[in-house]
Image: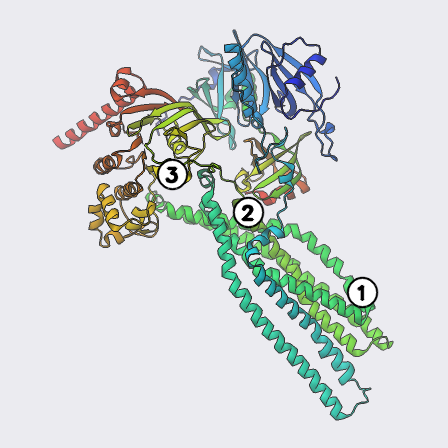
Amino acid sequence: MDNELTCYLDAEKIIFRTNENGFCMMEYADEIYKRVNLLKTCPQISPHKFICVQKMDSTEIGIIKDLNELDEESKIVAINELEKKYFLPEITKFVSIKIKPGTAFMDCIFGNVRKSFAVRDVSHNVFYVDNHTARINDSDGNRYIVNINKLNKKSRKMIEPLLY
Amino acid sequence: MKPKKIPFENNNDFISDILSTEKIKYEKIVASSQLDMNESFDFYDGFVAFDSEKIFVIKGKANSLDKYNVIKRKRPDFLCEKISVFENVTSLRIEKNITTCVLVAQTDSQEKQIAFFSFALLEKVSVFVENVNYFIENGVLPEKIQEINSKCVSCGKEIPYGRSYCKKCSEKKLGFKRIFTFFSKHKFVFAIIILLMLVEAALVVFVPQVSTKNLYDNVLNPGNTLGYDQLMKALLVTVGTIAGIKVLNLVIKIVYQFTTESLLPKIIYNIKNEVFASMQKLSLGFFTSKQTGSLMERVTRDSNNIYFFMVDGMPGVITNAIKLVGIAIVIFTMSWKLASMMLLGTPIIVLFVMLFNKKLRTIHHRLWLKQTSISSVVNDKINGHRIIKTFAKEDEETKDFKNKSNDLSEAQFYSKKVESIVFPFYSVALFLVGGFILFAGGMMVLRGEMSVGTLMSFIVYLEMIKEPVEFMTWVLNWWERCFDSSQRVFEIIDSKPDIVESENPQTLEKINGGIKIQNLDFEYEIGRPIIKNLNLEIEAGTMVGIVGKTGAGKSTIVNLIARLYDAKRGNIFIDGIDVRDLSFSQLRKNVGMVSQDIFLFMGTIADNIRYSKPDATFEEVIAAAKAAHAHDFIMRLPDAYETRVGSGGQGLSGGERQRISIARTIMQNPKILILDEATAAMDTNTERKIQQSISELKKGRTTIAIAHRLSTLKDADKIAVISNGEIVEYGTFEELIKLKGEYYNLYKIQNDLRKQMALGTEDENGQ
């Protein structure tokens, strides 16, 4: 396969830093990018591998094969940036799930915050991402993640029948 | 600062109040929006406001669990924690992450992240940003201020901040009553069935009274003083009564069976029709988001599950419930002591049933998932058989199917295993109760407290009770399956179509085909816009070509014109009327589409051509086929116009299928013709033939043609170049070439490529 079309960045030449306003900047091979956008190619399976680095106009600068190859500080900045971008609120407990025609109404706990939302078209919006992680998309377009193994028995009993 | 109630609408006064309390100097608040996250993306209440000079971000600490009144389920008052003030802001913008958003303020020298919120508030904050940006630029707010009020996702009614549904909707019940609506049309027949069941149950309960108690106590009692003839007469009367009851029971059973069987086809017809009709009303988005297998499961298997429960299960519930109540009354009349002992075991059984109730529902849901998965795999692989063969993946696909099949069989095995553990429990429990009754009843007979006939009747009733109790426990499993299925069926029936016809649709006398697109915004997923503020005007009877890279939004524009989706913002006018105000029938009749995805329905070629006009004469069918240059190849087929196409029909080439679809559109005779990459998958020869067909089709119509091959747009009056959902170039072919922009580059690349290919062919010929 022709690899010339893809520019893989040399991890040793990359420096990521956060600027005073909290944006991620990059220095690479004597060039300074005041702000870059980091994107995961496989967000679930390899969250820290094959990370695409883009300029703010969406032009690709290149791909970093593995964030572990970066120096420690750059790695922390990159991981923080990705965590912010790909942040999904994690549901830690289900208080109640009411299944009504066409919609499921969920009352959940996120850490120490309680929030209720509606999920339409349950069979499409409540599903397993892998064996122990499920995702829920609510009617507003928010996405939530649920670690089924971390849930208590009662919560698991509530959500399991809805998982597709 | 004192806690304040969070206002549902119009935050401006509320925010002014907070700022005053905090002794912050500010002008009158002109725009504001709610926020729901902090910088760590935890859910926190907050506000962002603009006072014509400064931006205020007010962070609350209201949404924390310790402040939330869990018992009263009441939202707490807003408690201000911190206010940040941002000055010299030149503009605001929103940056979207995967499920969170950041409000970024731009000043002369730098940009700063000032607030955070979830997608739930994206629309509200977007309006705030627009208003603020407009104010900064013009010194006033826009004349028409947009107001975004939260609406219930279920019923569409306005709801307070912090909820995505109204209380009323969340309290609607999905229960037996709802499922019974399928049978409401047959109330009378249903009443007859229930009456027959009542009579049958009463007879069943009555039989032991005659057959056992009367026989043992009055006829076979050794202490009887009656003579032989009288005893024989009494025996004959008893046996005759039993036989009479049995015959009557049999007659009732026959009538009951006949009535039920006559009702069955009607009910299954209703359920399937309702599900299918509901599906047809739903918008395109519903179908693109679902697996075909899952939808087919809902029409067939789920409808069947409901129907079988309601027709076989529910009557059984009624009969057996009557039997149980009848037996209970009879045995309590005979001996309340023994009857009480007999019913002692019931709570244990009920408790057991309740414990396994939920378990069985989860098991059946998992089983349904596996069955759906198998159906989807079969559907997918059959449709993709050509690709499977091309890549020689038969063995892998068979292995994959075996794995899925294995999953299903394991789930079935598990389900049966649980059932096989649960159900024998009841038999054992009943056996133990029986033994206890025999012992206690025997003691009562020995003490002279009860006759032998009464004890024998008790034992018969105990046997009789076994069947209803077993049925009741078993029927729960059945009910769970029906309930699980009904959830999926109602999910379709209750789904509200995204595209609905206006309450007072307009019907134009004649459509000329003039199109005007004004400030059009559209997104398939919230926060991921596909079309951005697009404006385009197409004169009636002209042809406009749309070019652009894959994913630029070309097909979305035509789908919006055809109203397969509705615009998020902006308008599309046809002859000056908003498409949302036009009647569906007029719109669909006047917008015809020929796309790259050709679909022919099962049926003959003639049926497919006359799809849009079922009453078309055969002459019209031939005329349409001729205009589409399809007639000649159709006539070469042995069955000509009667050739069966579609699933399982005659194999036609892509070009032939496309020409049939063009003939179908010619028959529709639309005033607006959309050609969405109609020749993209064709070779040059076929493309030429199809172009001839299309030339016929375009006459006298407004045509919008999307094409990658720019050569197919040479006849276009105007060409629009789309990039990232926006028109970047618009003009005639000559104008765009002169402009030397994106169109020119595309044209040059394709021209060079064509020349290279021509040279390559010449070289090959030279050799």
Q: Amino acid at mark 2?
A: Phe
**Quarter residue B197 falls in:** bottom right
Q: Earlier in the sequence, mark 1 or mark 2?
A: 1
Chain under label 3? B
Give the residue pinned by disc 2.
B490
How crowded pointer 1 is (Cα within 10 Å; few <14, some 14-19, many 20+) is rated as few
Q: Amino acid at mark 1?
A: Ser
**Quarter residue B132 falls in:** top right
Nearer-the-camera pick, B752 or B190: B190
Q: Secondary structure at mark 1?
A: helix
Identity of the residue furthest to the front in this view: B509
Left or right of B27? Residue B696 is left
Q: Is residue B106 above or below residue B335?
A: above
Give the residue pinned by disc 1.
B340
Q: Earlier in the sequence, mark 2 or mark 3?
A: 2
Nearer-the-camera pick, B130 or B595: B130
- Residue at image coords 38%, 37%: B587
What whole-number distance in Å separates the C-alpha atoms at marks 2 and 3?
31 Å
User: From where the camera sits, is residue B354 visible?
Assistant: yes
Q: Is residue B505 above or below residue B423?
A: above
What whole-number distance in Å separates the C-alpha atoms at marks 1 and 2?
43 Å
Query: Which label lies toward us, 2 or 3?
Result: 3
Q: Amino acid at mark 3?
A: Gln
Q: Earlier in the sequence, mark 3 or mark 1?
A: 1
Q: Secondary structure at mark 3?
A: helix
Chain under label 2? B
Q: Secondary structure at mark 2?
A: helix
